[in-house]
Image: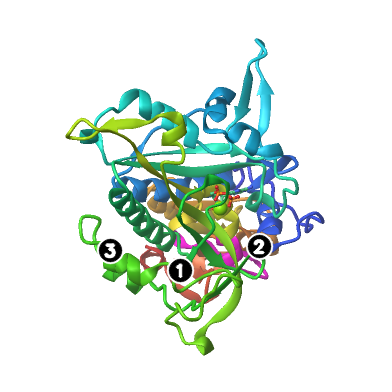
Amino acid sequence: MRMSVFFLPTLKETPAEAQIASHRLMLRAGMVRQTSAGIYAWLPLGHRVLRKIEQIVREEQDAAGAQELLMPTIQPAELWRESGRYDDYGKEMLRIKDRHERDMLFGPTNEEMITDIFRTAVKSYRNLPLNLYHIQWKFRDEIRPRFGVMRGREFLMKDAYSFDTDAAAARRSYQVMFLAYLRTFARLGLRAIPMRADTGPIGGDLSHEFIILAETGESGVYCDPDWLTLDVLTDAPGYQDDLNPFFERYTGIYAATDEKHDPTACPVPADQLVSARGIEVGHIFNFGTKYSEPMNARVALADGEQVAVHMGSYGIGVSRLVGGIIEASHDAAGIIWPAAVAPFKVGLINLKPDDDTCRSLCEDLEGTLAMGGDDQVLYDDRAERAGVKFADMDLIGLPWQIIVGPRGAKTGTVEVKNRATGERQEVETTRALDLVA
Ligand SMILES: Nc1ncnc2c1ncn2[C@@H]1O[C@H](COP(=O)(O)OP(=O)(O)O)[C@@H](O)[C@H]1O
Ligand SMILES: [Mg+2]
């Protein structure tokens, strides 16, 4: 991709309405544009990151045995009357009437709809366990949308729903998702802490929030933040193995909200605990028969007995993660993307686009890098001052920069900069390609 044609409306000024770093940086880097309060258009740079996160989430759901489908954003009110949530949900639900005066709504979540799809299709225990998920826009008419995409009104969520014949099987489905969440957040370059949570309006008896630590977070956490390293995941069992011991060891006891922390149940010595703030990026629930009973979603067991299925639901805030990752990874100059979600891997800066040597060297590098895919290189071929190019490239935070100037170009030398460490090296072009590979 060439910057001269790329739709990247960066801002020089810091937008006054943005209170936190990720919101400021997303606006300045031309990733999103607010179209009404808490509702955003995703511009090409932001859209690339959103899609990358979505894809990692998808791969880990698939690996855990969940199956992707796609439910609509607009739902009929009847389903929510059946579960009793139509009246309970309150003003956060955006209610709509169609031309026949039928009550519809823009889905804030999909428990009712998936239960309806399930009950009409599945009648036997032989079809269980089953886990279905989708990645779809949700709408919640938040009273105070803020912090950009972190608390929007419209947001992209991955929500999965598990169906099992009994409580023990449902607990295993929950554990499988718990592990999938740890893997997902680790792949995103995040350290997410599972924290025992209230089940809230979704109901049920077992729930965890996954929190990434950040000063600007809204949730208070009390935990030992050192325990959840990637090694934990390397040691983690596979999905087919016995997940129970792993789950017992890594859930609930380590992290809790400040009020809920129980020192007698917590194995971490008090002096190693810290009180911190965090951002909720995922939330999982095991709620038994809360929806299957009122909505009559039953299967026949082997002996013919009809039982209400045990369900769980599992959410990840895909669009919130874009902001969350920036909160966790930025500096004064801009964003620092973890490689896995970077919109492009390399920013190629041509300091003198009207110089033939510079141009042909850059075009060679661009061609070679682009063979790896359309997310490998963003080529700054614009006729701009060097200072502007450096500032823009630091702002949008690509993991690597290759800088080509007229002196080096004559001898085939370029500068390679690592955005995260700031380290710069003058190297031959072939070496530059190895460094960023
Ligand atoms: N208003 C919002 N804007 C962006 N992401 C959201 C919003 N509300 C929820 N999410 C994301 O969706 C995930 C699942 O939501 P859920 O737990 O059902 O919502 P809540 O925590 O508001 O009860 C949350 O963990 C969060 O990452
Ligand atoms: Mg939640």
Give neighbour class at mark 2: few <14, some 14-19, many 20+ (Cα, 10 Å): few
Q: CA distance from mark 1 to mark 3?
A: 61 Å
Residue 122, image x, y percentages: 30, 28
Q: Residue at x 42, y 53 (%)?
A: 364
Secondary structure under the numbered disc 1 in the rendered image? helix
Q: Position of residue 300 (x, y in %)?
A: 25, 31
What amino acid type is highlighted by mark number 3? Answer: Asn
| Residue 234 visible in the snapshot | yes
In the picture provided, is 299 more to the left or to the right than 365? left
For ligand 1, tell me if the residue under mark 2 lies within 8 Å.
no
Residue ID for mark 2 = 218
Which color scheme did the rendering employ for the protein? rainbow
Q: Are marks 2 and 3 in contact (CB under 8 Å)?
A: no
Q: Nearer the viewer, mark 2 or mark 3?
A: 3
Mark earlier in primary sequence (1, 3): 3
In the rendered structure, does residue 335 fall within the stretch colored magenta?
A: yes
Is residue 73 in view? no
Which residue is farthest left?
303
Of the pair 344 and 107, the residue shown nearer to us: 107
Q: List the residue tagged with mark 3.
A: 244
Reading the image, the residue beneath label 1 is: 411
Looking at the image, tell me whether mark 2 or mark 1 is earlier in sequence order.
2
Quarter of the image for residue 94 reads top right
Distance from label 2 to label 3 (Cα)?
Answer: 31 Å
**In the picture, which quadrant includes the C terminus?**
bottom left
* Residue 200 picture location, percent across and down: 57, 51
Residue range in magenta is 325-339
In the rendered image, residue 342 lying in the magenta stretch gets the answer no
